[in-house]
């Protein structure tokens, strides 16, 4: 039988093989990353680096560990996990400032200023960095917070790049393993498709109109001993496996991004949308994209709804219902409590304003009573 394959047939066949293998390798990587908590460890390493500490957890009086154990962050953990897989700049900054304020209050004023927060930093590198931010902000608290948030976002961008490079390396290893186990030899598959036989009775027809017979794809092994012999006796076959592995690693980014959007393959879930400024709705939402006002743009009329007759005990009950403990049970609607209220509002499908409406007060106090 003469060859009847075309370049399109070869490309399409190899694309299907690479795409399906990329899906398999990406799913395996996500399972491994989730089981071994790679994202949680990468986040903790980044926080320790920002705090000027070593990569070893459990250091005595570690500022990074206290930040990760802060109530606003501890509540983000999934069951059985050592920490969150994602941490917004707003929550990190709030926890850092709150921990520094606690250190400053231990030996200074009850309401520390920005300069007191800088002096309270336990690490010289962190203290120098915060001093630079405080100077740039002219000791303005909001400007100081904004610069810390930008600093954190820059660090997370670097950590994300490192994590992506690590993911590609693991997927390449998985691709080599899958190619060897399933006999995914690019050169052999391309040759089989290119040499697809055609019935000799149709040789007078145009190439595009020739009916093709089914092609037996050379995938899989008949016996283990045959697989070992074929690999050891044919260096060209090893080259075919390597081509497959490299192509799969290239396909993985594209396919994995696609599946994250459509199939929620990512074990840690989607990255939350930042809530500063005007945030558009998701692109796959029906209808035109509409900006959603965030906390900075909340209608001030809503603040009139905040319950004003709450006692200190009521606020402490609300703080307990929000999962706050220890020194955070202070009976005040401080910045930490506002952040916890925002997280609770998100969990019940409401806009994260940080404002205690009568509806929220009723729900939280009822929860505290239980």
Image: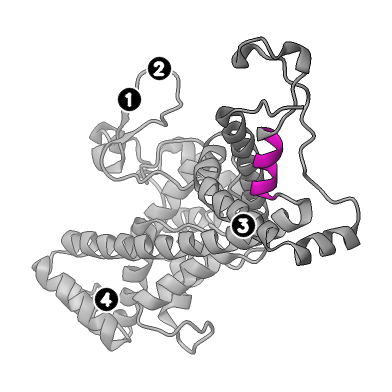
Mark 2, mark 4: which one is toward the viewer?
2
Mark 2, mark 3: which one is toward the viewer?
2
In the rendered image, which residue does mark 4 sit on?
110
For the residues labelled 3 and 4, the Cα–Cα distance comes to: 35 Å
**Dots 2, 4 in contact, CB < 8 A:** no
In the rendered image, which residue does mark 1 sit on?
290
Mark 4, mark 1: which one is toward the viewer?
1
**Dots 1, 2 in contact, CB < 8 A:** yes
Mark 3, mark 4: which one is toward the viewer?
3
In the rendered image, which residue does mark 3 sit on?
78
In the rendered image, which residue does mark 2 sit on?
287
Sequence-first disc among 4 and 1: 4
Sequence-first disc among 3 and 4: 3
Q: Which residues are magenta?
A: 185-193
For the residues labelled 1 and 3, the Cα–Cα distance comes to: 31 Å
For the residues labelled 2 and 4, the Cα–Cα distance comes to: 51 Å
Label 4: few (<14), some or many (≥20) within 10 Å?
Answer: few
For the residues labelled 2 and 3, the Cα–Cα distance comes to: 33 Å
């Amino acid at each position: 039988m003469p060859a009847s394959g075309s370049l399109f047939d070869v490309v399409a066949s190899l694309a299907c093989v690479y795409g399906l293998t990329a899906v398999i390798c990406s799913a395996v990587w996500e399972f491994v990353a989730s089981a071994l908590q790679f994202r949680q460890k990468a986040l903790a390493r980044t926080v320790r680096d920002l705090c000027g500490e070593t990569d070893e957890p459990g250091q005595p009086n570690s500022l990074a560990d206290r930040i990760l154990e802060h109530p606003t962050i501890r509540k983000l953990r999934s069951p059985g996990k050592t920490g969150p897989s994602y941490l917004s700049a707003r929550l990190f900054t709030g926890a850092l400032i709150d921990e520094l304020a606690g250190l400053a209050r231990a030996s200074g004023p009850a309401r520390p200023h920005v300069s007191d927060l800088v002096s309270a930093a336990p690490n010289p590198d962190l203290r120098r960095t915060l001093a630079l931010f405080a100077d740039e902000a002219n000791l303005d608290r909001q400007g100081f917070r904004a610069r810390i948030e930008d600093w954190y976002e820059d660090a997370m961008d670097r950590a994300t790049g490192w994590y992506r490079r690590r993911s590609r390396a693991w997927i390449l290893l998985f691709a080599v393993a899958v190619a060897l186990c399933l006999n995914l030899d690019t050169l052999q598959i391309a040759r089989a498709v290119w040499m697809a036989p055609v019935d000799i009775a149709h040789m007078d027809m145009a190439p595009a109109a020739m009916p093709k017979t089914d092609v037996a794809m050379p995938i899989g092994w008949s016996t283990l001993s045959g697989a070992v012999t074929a690999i050891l006796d044919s260096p060209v076959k090893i080259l075919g496996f390597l081509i497959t592995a490299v192509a799969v690693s290239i396909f993985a980014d594209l396919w994995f991004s696609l599946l994250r959007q459509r199939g929620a393959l990512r074990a840690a879930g989607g990255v939350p949308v930042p809530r500063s400024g005007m945030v558009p709705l998701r692109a796959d939402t029906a209808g035109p994209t509409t900006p959603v006002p965030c906390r900075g743009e909340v209608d001030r009329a809503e603040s009139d709804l905040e319950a004003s007759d709450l006692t200190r005990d009521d606020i402490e009950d609300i703080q307990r219902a929000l999962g706050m403990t220890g020194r955070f049970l202070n009976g005040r609607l401080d910045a930490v409590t506002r952040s916890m209220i925002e997280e609770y509002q998100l969990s019940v499908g409401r806009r994260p304003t940080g404002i205690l409406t009568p509806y929220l007060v009723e729900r939280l106090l009822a929860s505290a009573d239980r």
